[in-house]
Image (cartoon, grey):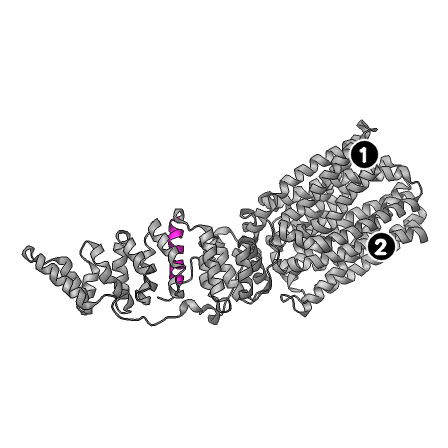
Amino acid sequence: MKDALLDDEGRRAVVAATLVSALLIAQQTAGRATRDALFLSTFPVAFLPAVMMASSAASVLAVGALSWALARRSPFRVLPVAAGLSSVLLLLEWLLCLAAPKVAAVAVYLHLSLFGGTLLSGFWSLINERFDPYTAKRVVGRISFGASVGGVAGGLMAWGASRLIPVPAMLLVMALLTLAAMVGMVGLGRHHGAVSSVAAETAAGTPSALNTLRRVPYLRDLALVVAIGAITDSLLDYVLKSQAASAFSRGSQLMSFFAILNTVFGVLSLGVQAGLARSSLRTLGLAGTVAVRPATILVVALLGLLDPRMWAAILARAGQDINTSSLFRSGYELLFTPLPEAEKRPTKAVVDVGFDKLGSLVGGAIALLAVALVPTQTPRVLFALAAVLCVAALSFTGRLHRGYVRSLEQSLRAGRVRLSASEVVDDATRHTLAQTGLALDRNTLLREIEAIRARDEAAGPDPLLQAITDLRSGDKGLVRLLLRQPPRPPAALVAHLLPLLAQDDLFLEALRALRRMAPEVTGQLVDALLDPRQDPAVRRRVPRVLKVCTTRRAVEGLVQGLDDELLDVREQCAIALASITSRSPDLSVPRADVFAAALREVKRAPRVLELDHVFTLLSLALEREPLQIALRALRGTDRALRGTALEYLENVLPEGLREALWPSLGEGAPAPRTARPRQDVMYELLNSSAAVPLSREALRARLPLGPPSRKA
C-alpha cells in the first residue's frame, strides 16, 4: 500500500535506504565473524580485552572526525566518502593477510571498530535528514526490516564462505558489499541537494557536540543509555568469545561458529522486527521499545549468574543482538528525528559511536580486570555486572518519553510557516449579519415601569426607571449617553442591556457597559448565554462580555456553552475561556472536559471541521504556541513541518481524539504513539527549521500568540 505522505521520489528513497541498510548490516555481520575468526585463531583469548580497548579508543578519535565533518557537510556527502575509504582499506588488509597475518588480524579488528558503527550511525543521520519525523516513523520500520534481512544474509554468507574459501578472502567480499552501499548512498543524496546548502549556512553557528550534550539533558540520557549498553555488550561478548576459543581452535571452525550464531540471530531479529516492532511502538512507545533490550538481558544475565556456561553466554548474546537490530533500533533512531540538523549532525555520531566506543573501552577494561583478579570466576562476575548495568539502563530509558515530546514542541516553535493571503483569510474573518429584535415584550415592560413609577412617585424621579425608559426609547443618542455611565444597581439593567448586543451600531458601547458590570452580574450573563430562547446574536456575543470575568462561575458557564447547538456560540465560548485561563491559570478547565468538547466538535461535522475552533479548544489543555504553529503548518505547503505538526499532535492528544481527528486532516490512521520529555526537546526543536539558531526570546517575539479571532 502506498504511503500518502510519500511521492514517487520518496518511495524510491525508501527502497534505496532499505537496500543500503541491508548491505551495511550484511557487511557488518560477515565482518564480525571474519574479524573474530582471524583474531582468535592468531592470538590467545587473553589478548582479546586489550584489542577491544585499543579499537574502542581509536573509534573515539574517529567519531570526533565524523562529528566535525557532519557539522560542516551533509551526511549525503560525508557517508559515501567514508564507505569508499573503508572499501579501499579492506582490499589493503586482504593483501596484508598474505604477508603478515598477525598484523592483519589486528588491523581488521581496528578497521571494523572504526568504520562499522561510524558508517551505520552516519547512515541513520542521513535517514533522519531525508525524512521528516512524521514520515520517518512510517518508513523506519521498512528500513530496519531491510537491515534485519541484511543480518541474515551476512551470517549465511560468512557460514558459506567458511566452507568454501579461506578466512582472509572474506575481506574481498566485505569490500564489495561496502562499495555497493556507497553507490546506494550516492543515489539517496542525488535528489536532496538542499541539505548541503543548509549545512554550509549553519556551519559557522553550529554548536560543538560536547557543548550540546552539556546543554541538553535529553541527549545526555540517550548517550548514557548507549554507553551502558556498550559496556554490557563488551562484557557479554568477552564471555562468549572466551568460551568459543576454548571449544574451537581452527580459524574456519571459529568463523563457522560465529557465522551460524549471527545467522540465527539475524533470522530471529527479522522475525521480531516483522512481528513485534510496530505493535511495540504502538503499545510501549519509543522509550518503552528501547527499554526491552536491557530488560531482556537482565533476565538472561541473572540466569548466567546461576549457570555461567556457554548456553547462557549464547542466550545473553542473542538477547543483545536480536533486540539491538530490531526493537531497540526501531525506537532509538526515532528518538533523534525531532532534533534540529545543526545539533543532530555532530551529536548523533558522538552519541551513536563515541559513547558506544567509550562504553566498549570501559567494558574491555572491566573484562581485563576480571581476568586478572578472578580468572576462575570471570564469566560469573561479568554476568553479575551486566545485570547491574541493565538496571541502570532501565532507569534512564524511563526519562526519554518526556524529552521527546518537549523536543517536538520546540521544533514547532522553530517552524517559520508563511501563508498566503488566501490561507490567512479563513472562517475566523467571516461576519454574519446580526439578527435584531428585542427579547422582552415591550408592553409588559412598560406596564412594569408604570407600576414602579406609581409606587415610588412620592419619592421623586427614579434614576433606574428613567434609565430603563431611555434604553427602550429607540433614541440611539440617548442610549449611547446612558451606556457611558449607567446607574446602579447593575443587576436591574442587565436584561435591558443584553438586547443591545444584537444591534451592530450599538454593540461596542453595550459591550463596554456590560463588561464594567460583568463581575457583579456573572450569573445573569451565564443564564443569557445558555438560554436557547435568547437571540442567537446576543448569545454569540455574551462570551465576549464574560471574558473579563476571572471567576470560577464564568468559567463553568462558558464550559457549558461548549456543548451548545450553535457553532458560533461554541466558538466564542472557547475563545473567552482561552482569554480567561491565560490571565488566570488557576481557573484552568479540566483536561477531560476540553478533550471531550474537542471530540464532540470532530464528530459533529468531520468533513467541514472548524479547525480554528478545535485548536482553540485544545489550547485550554495544551501548550498554545505549538498548537498555533501546528495549525498553520497543517494549512501550509511545507511537508516536513506538516509531518512535525502531526507527530506533535500524536504525542499530546488522547487516543480517541486522535483517531477521530485524523481523517479530517486528510490522513489515515494515526501512527503509534511515541515516547519522550518536554522542556529539553522544546529548545532543541526551537531551532530545527531555522538557518541560524535563535534564542528563546527571539523566537517567541516572532510567533503569533493567543487564540484566533472569530466573527463579532
Residue linked to disc 1: 308
Residue 91 in view in this figure? no
**Residue 41, how many percent across, how many down?**
91, 42
Q: Was residue 287 drawn as part of the magenta stretch in this picture?
A: no
Say left or right for 483 vs 335.
left
Instruction: Kindly identify the amino acid type of the residue bearing the numbered disc 2.
Output: Met
Quadrant into which the N terminus falls: bottom right
Q: In the rendered structure, find residue 599 and report the number of the disc placed on it.
A: none
Q: Are marks 2 and 1 in contact (CB under 8 Å)?
A: no
**Residue 474, how many percent across, how many down?**
19, 70
Residue at 71%, 45% (x, y): give it.
354
Quadrant into which the C terminus falls: bottom left
Q: In the rendered structure, find residue 174 and report the number of the disc placed on it.
A: 2
Instruction: Kindly identify the amino acid type of the residue bearing the numbered disc 1.
Output: Pro
Q: 670 or 638: nearer the eye? A: 670
Specify the principal SS of the magenta part. helix
Magenta stretch? Answer: 570-584
Q: Residue furthest top?
A: 373
Residue 221, located in which quarter of the rendered image?
Answer: top right
Real-space Cα distance between discs 2 and 1? 34 Å
